[in-house]
Image (cartoon, rainbow, N blue to C red):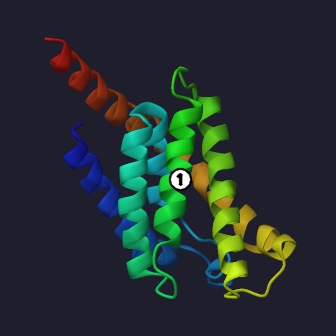
Amino acid sequence: MSMQRIVGVMLLLFLIQGTLFYWFVPSSMVGRIVPHFTLAFVLFAGLYRGRHSALILGMAFGLLQDLAFYGRIIGIHSFTMGLVGYMTGLLLERRKSTLLMALTMIGMSTLVYDTIVYFIYRVFRLTSETYEWALSQHMVPSLFLQLLFSLAVYVPARRWFEGSFVAKTEEEET
């Protein structure tokens, strides 16, 4: 699948994570679970397309997330999503990624993403909660949702990202 279509799918996921998702979550969990569906696709881009694609997608969709949802400080999610996507792509640059490796990297990257955002908010005094409270109340429930989503879309995402990368590589060789 071409990168334009992948961006279209990510825009659709961005709309779903900000609107439709909260209709299906119980009202007691609405403040606790934060979906990061676009982050999952940024991490898939890092795993299967390359670190530079993940960096660009992460910065673009992080900025979109900053503008749409978190207007207090612009750029936190853009910086963090780009950084986490780049680092994921850098760590697994020369390795073939299996399902277990991909889910492990997505889980760790999601925790790193949430931790960096928490500490930036803590530095600018936008939160007064402890890290342990944020970890147990927000990060871990969101992590389980992220892993379930990543498991559900693993096969199509891998085909989309690897297919677009293989086609581009074969065109460059000829």
Counting from the top left corner in percent of width and height, residue 27 is at 62, 84
Asked which quadrant contains residue 105, the reply is: top right
Total of numbered circles in the picture? 1
Q: Is residue 122 above or below residue 139?
A: below
Q: Is residue 106 above or below residue 11?
A: above
Q: Is residue 72 above or below residue 123?
A: below
Counting from the top left corner in percent of width and height, residue 22 is at 50, 77
- Determine the residue positioned at 51% across, 88% down: 72
Instruction: Between residue 109 and residue 150, name the one nearer to us.
Output: 109
Amino acid, disc 1: Leu
Residue for badge 1: 83
Disc 1 is placed on an element classified as helix
Counting from the top left corner in percent of width and height, residue 131 is at 82, 72
Asked which quadrant contains residue 151, the reply is: top right
Q: Work out which residue is located at the far top of the displayed protein and give it.
A: 174
Counting from the top left corner in percent of width and height, residue 148 is at 60, 50
Location of the C terminus by quadrant is top left
Lateral position of residue 123 relative to residue 171, left or right: right
Lateral position of residue 123 relative to residue 71, left or right: right
- Determine the residue positioned at 50% across, 48% down: 85
